[in-house]
Amino acid sequence: MAKDSSFDIVSQVDMQEVDNAVQQVSREIVQRYDLKDTGSTVTLDKTASTITVSAPADFIVQQIKDVMGGKFVKRGIDLKALSWGKLETASGSTVRVVCTIVDGIEQEIAKRINKDIKDKKFKAKVTIEGDKLRVSSPKRDVLQEIIAFVKENDYDIPLQFTNRR
């Protein structure tokens, strides 16, 4: 019997790249003429995987989000990894928005990916292992077809294919 080939479907973000992008955004806020004296701040909480943007007005928050999007794209971070919360008022007549960094595949999305693969009737076995999926099959061509199929579909999170064996 031939050994099965496999790969993992994961959703991971390099937190060091996120940290670098947030530092670049903070530097740009200090240097840009339209954002310089606004008192806006961008902070990263690595343990909670959140980014907090504080500014005096929602218009400035939107400008900072645009700058942040550009910096993240340049650093190779998919913008689907950012889940923006609602704009809320903070102390001192400022507004704040919290952005959560998506890390790992949620159970409902994992089940949806699993169901989609099974509905296409690929000759492969899909198992959900925590926040990732393991796909295995005796034929590597089937695995490549599954990768192409998953890339075609939009699951609202960035997906990577790792641990190919």
Image (spheres, rainbow, N blue to C red):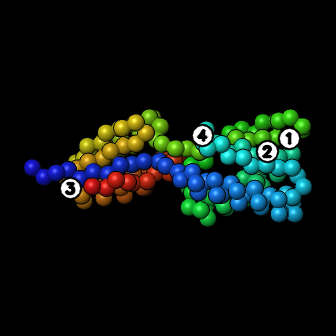
Q: Label 2 belongs to which residue?
A: 54
Q: Which amino acid lies under the numbered mark 1 shown in the image of this protein?
A: Thr
Q: Label 1 belongs to which residue?
A: 94
Whole-percent x, y for residue 14 in the image: 53, 53
Q: Label 4 belongs to which residue?
A: 47
Q: Label 3 belongs to which residue?
A: 139
Does dot 2 land on a helix, a strand or a loop? strand
Q: Nearer the viewer, residue 102 or 152?
A: 102
Does dot 1 land on a helix, a strand or a loop? strand
Q: Nearer the viewer, residue 60 or 25?
A: 25
Whole-percent x, y for residue 136 in the image: 26, 48
Question: Reading the chain from its start, which is encountered first: label 2 or label 1?
Answer: 2
Q: Which amino acid lies under the numbered mark 3 shown in the image of this protein?
A: Lys
Q: Nearer the viewer, mark 1 or mark 3?
A: 1
- CA gap, disc 3 and disc 4: 40 Å
Q: Residue at x 72, y 53 (%)?
A: 65
Q: Which amino acid lies under the numbered mark 2 shown in the image of this protein?
A: Ser
Whole-percent x, y for residue 81 in the image: 56, 49
Q: Residues within 10 Å of mark 2 (few under 14, many from 20)?
A: many
- Residue 34, picture quadrant: bottom right
Q: Nearer the viewer, mark 4 or mark 1?
A: 4
Question: Reading the chain from its start, which is encountered first: label 3 or label 4?
Answer: 4
In the displayed structure, 61 sits above or below 148; it is above
Q: Residue at x 61, y 44 (%)?
A: 46
Q: Residues within 10 Å of mark 1 (few under 14, many from 20)?
A: some
Question: Reading the chain from its start, which is encountered first: label 3 or label 2?
Answer: 2
Asked if the residue under mark 1 is in contact with the one under mark 2, i.e. CB atoms within 8 Å, the reply is: yes
